[in-house]
Image (cartoon, grey):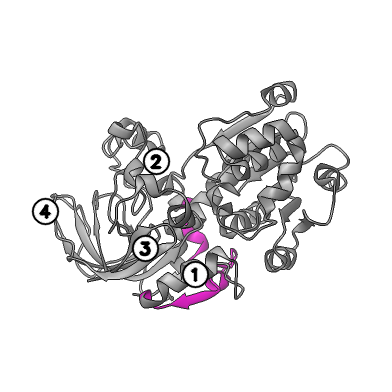
Amino acid sequence: MKALTWHGRRDVRVDTVPDPTIEQPTDAIIRVTSTGLCGSDLHLYEVLGPFMQEGDVLGHEPMGIVEAVGPEAGDLQVGDRVVVPFNISCGRCFMCEHGLQSQCETTQVREQGMGAALFGYTKLYGEVPGGQAELLRVPQAHYGPIKVPEGPPDDRYLFLSDVLPTAWQAVQYAQIPDGGSLAVIGLGPIGEMACRIAQHLGAATVIGLDLVPDRLARSNGHGVHTVDVTATDDIPGAVRELTDGRGPDAVIDAVGMEAHGAPVGKLAHALAGLMPDPVARKVMETAGVDRLSALRAAAEIVRRGGTISLSGVYGGAADPLNMLKMFDKQVTLRMGQANVRRWVDDILPLLGGDDDPLGVDSFATHHLSLSEAPQAYETFQKKQDGAFKIVFRP
């Protein structure tokens, strides 16, 4: 089969690799019909080389048609149309039963000290071949795959693999009070979808912070108050002006890994101005200023007694958080990989009608063949050609 494989920093290629086979009784094989390019894929493209091996198959946002099933794959049948969550979970262990599928005890990558295995995402998460390929082996297929109806285009359901549950969890963790306010740092796919979900669930004021004009315009177009972080020297002040001077009830940090490799002058570098210079210099050397500056900005912006929700992925071990500030402000901090299966029952009813309240049908900006994937990674990284969300159709 054809699959997108990692060969080094900024070097991904479409190779011919062996077709996957049923290896465990709970496995299934799907023929991939659509698969997304995620912002966190750019981190593999750019800086996570030490945790990759040449030939690793990338991608963790697939959907398709079931081609084969193992004898213990539950009620999954050949021909079913399914979306595959990016985390691999069993549905039976203590963590899964408590809605923490991202911590599944059956698939935990214990040798790395990490949680549940993920598709297409480094040794840290099990080095499971990913979904930017023509075929995909799906472990724990008795539980993971989400059956969806025939008829609507793939885009109606594809984002159940990652974008929708990640953004939904971010909003749920933000604990926005009825009629309350939310600021979202970073208006990439996760941040933009979090804005839409917060509005759908009743947030009265949603504020989005970014520096990419296309992203700011996209969010502003559906009622988000946008702040161009390059246009002000006082980002917290600009947000407070929109929230009666006290700051929003909640802040979602949706920057995380997506910032890596973005153009010079990116959101993260603008936010770094909130860090003391000696701290910023040390962090740049040890843990990556992009991640930490966004979190520090969240701590500065949120109102006293508010909540910070992290959907951006954090990788640095040396994280000099302003704990004094966060403790003094009695801030609640929630984070973690999305527990996809936990939120599916809440989200799926919003995808079955004609009104498309979350705008999934028009969410992707580019639909490309798998052969175009290497160039698409570069285009997405450089934010060229209006690339906001790219979907491959193998």
Q: Cα distance, mark 3 to mark 2?
A: 17 Å
For the question of whether residue 123 can be seen, the reply is yes
Q: For the residue marked with disc 1, what is the amino acid?
A: Ile
Residue located 72% across and 45% down the image: 271
Q: Which residue is mark 3?
A: 62
Q: Cα distance, mark 2 to mark 1?
A: 24 Å
Sequence-wise first label, 2 or 4: 4
Sequence-wise first label, 3 or 2: 3
Determine contact: label 1, label 4, CB under 8 Å: no
Q: Cα distance, mark 1 to mark 3?
A: 12 Å
Sequence-wise first label, 1 or 3: 3
Q: Which residue is mark 4?
A: 71
Q: Cα distance, mark 3 to mark 4?
A: 23 Å
Mark 4 residue crowding within 10 angstroms, few (<14) / some (14–19) / many (20+)? few
Q: For the residue marked with disc 2, what is the amino acid?
A: Ser
Q: Which residue is mark 2?
A: 102
Instruction: Verify whether residue 341 appears in magenta.
Output: no
Q: Which residue is mark 1?
A: 390
Closer to viewer: mark 1 or mark 4: 1
Element marked by disc 1: strand
Sequence-wise first label, 3 or 4: 3
Query: Closer to the camera, 374 or 125?
Result: 374
Whether residue 248 sits left or right of residue 389 in the image: it is right
Residue located 23% across and 51% down the image: 139
Mark 3 residue crowding within 10 angstroms, few (<14) / some (14–19) / many (20+)? many
Q: Please give the range of residues in magenta.
A: 345-370
Element marked by disc 4: loop
Q: Cα distance, mark 2 to mark 4?
A: 25 Å
* Residue 78 x %, y %: 19, 67
Sequence-wise first label, 1 or 4: 4
